[in-house]
Amino acid sequence: MADDPFFVGWQDNVPKLSRRKVLLAGAGLALGAGALGLGLGNQAPAPGPGVWDQGRKLAMTGTIYPEPYLHLLTEDLGGGPRPVFLVGQGKDRITVRPALTFTGAAVTGTMIERGEHAMMAVDDIYADPAPGRVMPGPETDLGEVVMTGEILDAKCWFGAMRPGHGKTHKACASLCARGGLPLAFCETGRCGEGKAALLFLDARGRAFGPEIIPLVADPVIIRGRIFEVAGLRQVRVALGDVVRL
């Protein structure tokens, strides 16, 4: 018994054969873990092209409308009047003095953009009569739809968070919805695309209240109508026509 080898980890008496096996096993585990991580990363859904450029302050002019969500209707983005939703720096909406609505205004802040969607985290709003009143034009009814997908908070999906959809984003989406931020809807399998989301409104074309929060960021099926207003598509849905899957 006195001549039997005895392994002590902190001593330099590990048999060469055992040392070789340990080193090979460790190297194999490291390579395997790296390959697994790479494979899982490649299979993850695309976070999408949304960007929040917090280092670049911009000023835009147009007309502020309070409904369905506070937004600046502006021609500064090109292509005719386009809405830029106005939000706070965090998970909260902002309010403006009634005197600043339905008239010329200038807004400063940082842009959150994804495809044709635009939002501004506001620093300041002030009257600017120079641009005059920008009008949204007539709305276009594009017909009834039935879709499966997910109700999103638009700020994160536009680019404040990547990815801004899915189960990992549910808690954040619920907080943003409670804060009164705009809601959007994307079809299943299209949340990573640039132009896939629709502004999500009730059947009257108004913002939902707290009753919609339990359904945010869960798979749902909806029945509603799609409208296009100022180049932005929206889906209008009665609360009873939103069913969790």
Image: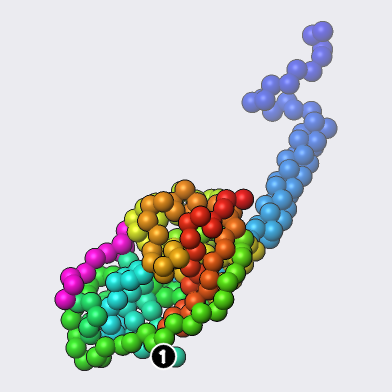
The residue positioned 47% from the left and 48% from the top of the image is 214
Q: Nearer the viewer, residue 133 or 241?
A: 241
Q: Give how far across and how far down residue 144 sits, in percent.
A: 58, 72
- The residue labelled by disc 1 is 80
Q: Is residue 188 left or right of residue 57?
A: right
Q: What amino acid is labelled 1 in the image?
A: Gly
> What secondary structure is found at the residue carrying circle 1?
loop
Question: Residue at image x 25%, y 70%?
Answer: 123
Q: Is residue 64 visible?
A: yes
Closer to us: 217 or 107: 217
| Residue 160 makes an appearance in the image | no
Residue 3 x/y as whole percent: 82, 12
**Boundaries of the magenta span:** 88-99
97 left or right of 22?
Answer: left
User: In this rendering, is residue 8 above or below 128?
Assistant: above
**Quadrant location, the N terminus:** top right
